[in-house]
Image: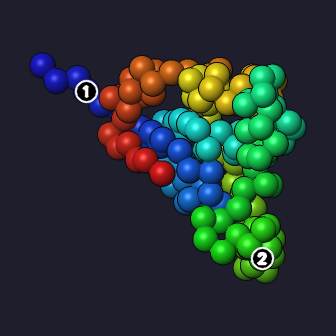
Amino acid sequence: MAKEKDNGTTLVVMSGDQDKMIAAFNIALGAAAMGKETNMFFTFWGIKALQRGNFTGKGLFGRMIGILNRGGINRIGPSRFNMFGLGRWMFKVMMKNKNVPSLEELRQTALDLGVKLWPCQMSMEIMEIKAEDLIEGVQNSCGVAAMLEMSDRSKQTLFI
């Protein structure tokens, strides 16, 4: 007999781009507002949205990634037209002028609505990101098996 699925939504957030991150949080907020159990699994560059913004890494390569790809939601740039940070600034100004919440506000609203934010354990290990490098409110890191279990229980799984 097939397993009954709940009314949940699972999002796999791999992109660390501003526009894709805005879409991911908007979808998660919509699902949570509809009363769906909502899980967001952040892997590789997506983890930037969960980082405090401090430098990370212990080994040479980990430190290089920590410098070149410094995390923090306010450092996330658009997938196109970033122009050395100018595009990020332009989008922030345009969002504010249109009364669109910032990425930081979207993330906080997600936490307030009970969206569970899960960092990928393997990505954290590879990029040498420790749990204390992440913001408060995120779940403990988990692996792909846990994400697949969330996905299996959900009626919909989206990859961004």
Other-residue count near label 2 (Cα within 10 Å), few / some / many at <14 / 14–19 / ≥20:
some
Mark 2: amino acid: Met
Q: Can residue 55 be seen by looking at this rendering?
A: yes
Is 58 drawn above or below residue 113 in the view shown? above
| Residue located beneath label 1 in the image | 4
Q: Position of residue 110 (x, y in %)?
A: 65, 45
The answer to whether residue 11 is left or right of residue 106 is: left
Position of 69 compared to 17: left or right?
A: right
Residue found 51% across the figure and 21% down from its top:
143
Residue 116 appears in the rendering: no
Q: Amino acid at mark 1?
A: Glu
Q: Position of residue 134 (x, y in %)?
A: 77, 31
Q: Which residue is mark 2?
A: 90
Q: Is 126 above or below relative to 64?
A: above
The residue sitting at 56% across, 36% down in the picture is 43
User: In terms of image quadrants, where is residue 55?
Assistant: top right
Question: Mark 2 and mark 1: span between their CA atoms?
Answer: 45 Å
Disc 1 packing (10 Å; few <14; some 14–19; many ≥20): few
